[in-house]
Image (spheres, rainbow, N blue to C red):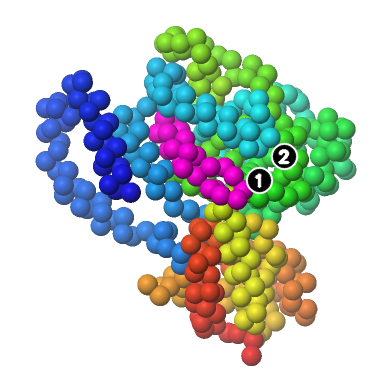
Amino acid sequence: MKDLLTQALSDFNDWRRMWPDDADDPLIQASMGAAPAVMNELSERLKGNFPFHSPFYAGQMLKPPHPVAWAAYALAASINPNNHALDGGPPTSEMEKEVIRELGTLFGFPSALGHLTSSGTIANLEALWIASKCVPGKVVAFSSDAHYTHQRMCEVLGLTYVILDDIRDVVMRPDIGTLVVTLGTTGLGRVEPLHDILPFCKENGIRIHADGAYGGFFKLLGGDAWDVLGEVDSFVVDPHKHGMQPYGCGCVLFKDPAVGRFYKHDSPYTYFSSDELHLGEISLECSRAGAAAAALWATMKVLPFERDRGLGQILSACRDAAVALASRLEASGRFDILEAPQLDIVAYLPRTSRPLASAISAASDSIFEQGMSAGAQGIWVSKYRVPTRRIAALRPGLIADSEFTTVLRSVMMKPSHLTYVDQIAQRLIDIEFDALG
């Protein structure tokens, strides 16, 4: 892949040689003397990261970009296009529009208005902002498992919100104007039952925003909630998660293109180079990296959005890895599974000799720390804090000596996790803790 990038850069530089290069500027040249030492120092400091690329890293939601994605990003970043106005990046703006059309088709919005964002947080902010314009003065509702960004963004926008134990509880709240349905919660990868609540919301004029920032691309594999996704009002997905893109690359889509009227604004020095749509005219963000659009466009070309090949194959492998890990850990007799994985996240708790919530937390802490400290033989997982009442059904006789219990969580979002799942499970099983005899 390095050779591929080198060749692409060589071809690209043939075009760049047509114009003077500011790298020849004496002020820039004067700063280059320190560059080798600085880059060596940077290389050393970057070694302080965890091995995110390794299949034995199954901790947080950190999926290495596809090699084509980072190569395309690096190539485009060498000219640093800005996808705000068309004159800031004509080719990458067109690539972004092509990507949006492809994503709209995938998620059931063939006429969608949308654009890439710097993150899922900003994408959700825009969706809630548009919702507040469409149903002004109404309450926003989301479940207790929704990402915390919804509460924060409601506070930023000055919107009243309510947190539901279950999205189906919306039927008991006549003041709700917008319901956020999470398709792939970031804690457990739970897909909330959009199909169950959709008819009630449509009948009662409740706007639905689907947050698929984490799980959205699992639409490729199908299922009840995914089958009705095209009927929601807005949708968010993060290509920098399962779309295998570098950070940051989010996306927001609106089913009704007419909501673009809420973005309408003017600028004294942009939007003059073309009568075509400038992406800044339908975005809250101004400057955005054209390199992100180039990377997603290129990845989409080599890894098509299809169920049985391309991205669908990768997602299937990730989900299979999660199911396999849950099965192996439970079969070992040393762990219980918090709930069957729906996507590619597994939460599990050690079986401890003492029937105390605090003992489970202590064992989880110990496994977490031992795995991280074992070097090349280690296993990197994450911790997840859950209300103790949620695990009581798994442990009859559990003494709830703390309100919350710490369990372990593995995000199996790399296709290589399926290849290594037996070794991942065994490394966890082999870690010593105060286990049930």
Residue 273 image offset from top left, x and y in percent: 42, 10
List x then y, in percent, for residue 185.
65, 51
Residue 323 is situated, as x and y percent measured from the top left of the image, at 64, 66
Of 362 and 372, which appears nearest the observer?
372
Residue, far front: 308
Q: Label 1 crowding class (10 Å Cα cut-off): few <14, some 14-19, many 20+?
A: many
Residue drawn at x 33%, y 39% as measured from the top left? 74
* Residue at the bottom extreme of this rendering: 437
User: Looking at the image, which residue is at 83% across and 33% down?
Assistant: 202
Q: Residues within 10 Å of mark 2 (few under 14, many from 20)?
A: many
Q: Secondary structure at mark 1?
A: helix
Q: Decide: is 70 above or below 410.
A: above
Horizontal and vertical percent position of residue 384: 60, 63
Can the viewer see residue 152 in this picture?
no
Quarter of the view holding residue 349: bottom right
Which residue corresponds to mark 2?
A: 229
Can residue 335 be seen from the camera position used here? yes
Residue type highlighted by circle 2: Leu
For the residue marked with disc 1, what is the amino acid? Answer: Lys
Q: Residue at x 46, y 11 (%)?
A: 274
Range of residues picked out in magenta: 286-311
- Distance from label 1 to label 2 (Cα)? 8 Å
Specify the quadrant of the image occupied by residue 260: top right
Q: Do residues under tags 1 and 2 come within 8 Å of each other at their CB atoms?
A: yes
Q: Which residue is mark 1?
A: 219
| Residue 224 among magenta residues | no
Residue at 59% over, 70% down: 325
